Amino acid sequence: MLTFVLVHGSWHDGSAWKAVIDHLETKGHLAFAPTIAGHGKGVNKNVNHARCTQSIVNYIVSKDLTDIVLLGHSFGGTIIAKVAEAIGDGFAGQRQRIRRLIFFDAFVLNDGESLRDNLPPHLQQLIDRLAKESDDNTMTMPFDLWCEAFINDADLELAKSSYVQLSSEPYQPSIDKLDLKQFYSLPIPKSYLYCTEDNSLPQGEWGWHPRMSNRLGLFRFVQMPGSHEVMFSNPGGLAEKIIVAGRD
């Protein structure tokens, strides 16, 4: 049995993982899905990356979770890297907190970079504009972008029903520069889970794999068909691949 902590990406909260967790639990595993600070509906969006990270650290420590497989999706990849720095070397009793990291179509930043630095120019311009046009320094996902690039493996009905679960995304965490020197020195095993139809970053030179994945050095590579939002379009298939990516 494995214990998974699933960290969502931008525009989401922990509820995005509900169907995936159901599948993981039917296979005998435990799974938790915290919501990052500043994410979800009706919450204070005035957060930075450090506050986002600390909220996940606090969740893991408060539940005294040990020997976990920590997964980060998309923006969540930047969170799990910093969480690993905070508690990756720490022990609870005789058991280590984190046994493996899974980056699921996730950002793997170079030391000193921000998430924004890793977007192609047209997406940099888009998030800058969305934040500037908001009244609270957040970004609201355009539906056409969601439908065509994020959940492109779903029909219109699923695209619409999943879209209403989204909320505005704080801008500040995407522009914060991250010191990742400690992360790149950690011996924690790592996996990269890649969906082959993921078009949220343009395929090719700006894509997830191999640009992001190869930054991990030694890692386990797992791939599956699907879009960036396969947790909605194929949660059972995703759960099976998460188990493969998380096993010893």
Image (cartoon, rainbow, N blue to C red):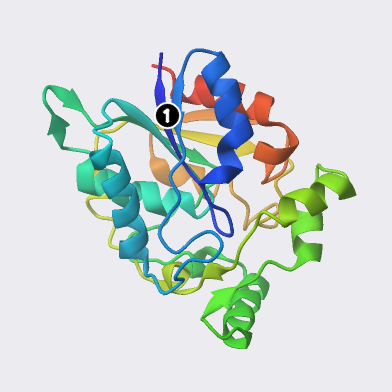
In the orientation shown, which residue stands out farthest toward the left? 93
Left or right: 112 with respect to 149? left
The structure residue drawn at horizontal position 55% and vertical position 29%, both measured from the top left corner, is 21
Q: Is residue 21 left or right of residue 185?
A: right
The total of numbered circles placed on residues is 1
At 24% from the left edge and 32% from the top edge, which residue is drawn?
97
Q: Quick one: label 1, few (<14), some, or many (20+) residues within 10 Å?
A: many
Question: Which residue is pictured at 28% across the width and 47% down the height?
Answer: 57
Image: 223 above or below 229: above
Which residue is the extreme one toward the right? 156
Q: Does the rendering let one see residue 151?
A: no
Residue 148's place in the image compared with 232, above or below, is below
Residue bearing the label numbered 1 = 4
Under circle 1, the secondary element is strand
Image quadrant where one finds the N terminus: top left
Quadrant of residue 38 within the rendered picture: bottom left
Amino acid type for the residue under numbered disc 1 = Phe
Which residue is drawn at the image coordinates 56% and 86% (left, top)? 135
Q: Quadrant of the C terminus?
A: top left
Q: Position of residue 44 (x, y in %)?
A: 44, 70
Question: Image check: 27 left or right of 4?
Answer: right
Q: Is residue 115 left or right of residue 140?
A: left
Give the percent coordinates (x, y) of residue 73. 52, 45
Q: Nearer the viewer, residue 125 or 221?
A: 125
Q: Position of residue 81 (x, y in %)?
A: 35, 48
From where the camera sits, is residue 197 visible?
yes
How far across and down, in percent of the image, does residue 190 sit? 39, 33
